[in-house]
Amino acid sequence: MQRAAVFDVDGTLVDTNHLHVTTWWETLRQAGHRVPMHAVHRAIGLGSDDLVAHLLGDDRDKDQDDELSAAHKALYGQYFDRLPALQDAGRLLRRLDQDGWRVVLATSAGGAELSALRRAIDADDAIMATASADDVEQGKPHPEPVEHALELAGVPAESAVFVGDTVWDMRAGSRAGVRCVGVLCGGIPRADLVEAGAQAIYDDPAHLLASLANSPLA
């Protein structure tokens, strides 16, 4: 039976979470919103619309949402040519591909941002498909991104593992019925990932690669 290794990207394969924190904080500051960085950090992993709603609440001026999203994209886009892949991210994906896993990305990024992330990972030869923000109606923690990744891979949930770095990833994977693996390189505490559904925790892609034989991706 075929099996799928589904990966979040930001904070899981590419070291971008704190770039997102800084650029979202600046975006909100310029728009007159005072949101502490720790709150922004906890929201990273949500799609833009959901992130704004999570941080500013339902009583915000919703007409401003698209402007905030565009402003964040402009600020974050300054880093596209130097996004840093986490250690061994590309090697991990290639190893899983060689071991017979169908590697699929499930990410809130899309368009030029996703292209920049894939360039940073530099493992397109190992990536079968991508379920991006352009492909789904609802982002994490809704299971749709993971479910779409499974459709692209052509495997059932019980034959898949989802790797991510946020509670939104773990909740999305759990709701989709897949085994969830958490990584700590996005800055979210171990206990929070476990509570959200992580069945195993690793420091980063390099740690997971070194531990594959005894991991859910064995």
Image (cartoon, grey):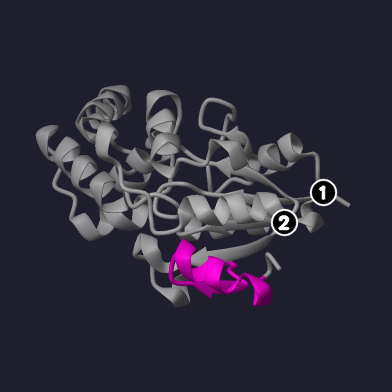
Up-down relation of residue 66 to residue 46 (above or below): above
Query: What residue span does the magenta drawing correspond to?
Result: 193-215
The residue to which callout 2 is attached is 99
Residue in view at x 29 percent, y 56 percent = 41
Q: Position of residue 76 (x, y in %)?
A: 24, 34
- What's the residue type where badge 2 is placed? Asp
Is 126 included in the stretch rendered in magenta?
Answer: no
Magenta-drawn stretch contains 195: yes
Q: Is 67 situated above or below 49?
A: above
Q: Which residue is mark 1?
A: 156
On the rendered structure, is 43 left or right of 20? right
Viewport quadrant of the C terminus: bottom right
Of tags 2 and 1, the one toward the viewer is: 2
| Image spot of residue 137 (x, y percent) | 58, 29
| Crowdedness near tag 1: few (<14), some (14–19) or many (≥20) residues, C-alpha within 10 Å | some
Q: Is residue 194 visible?
A: no
Query: In this image, 194 relative to 1: left or right?
Result: left
For marks 2 and 1, the one nearer the N-term is 2
Q: Residue at x 41, y 68 (%)?
A: 184
**Place of residue 136 in the rendered image (x, y in percent of width and height, measured from the top left):** 59, 30
Q: CA distance from mark 2 to mark 1?
A: 18 Å
Q: Position of residue 114 (x, y in %)?
A: 44, 32
> Please, what secondary structure does the residue beneath circle 1 have?
loop
* Amino acid residing under circle 1: Pro
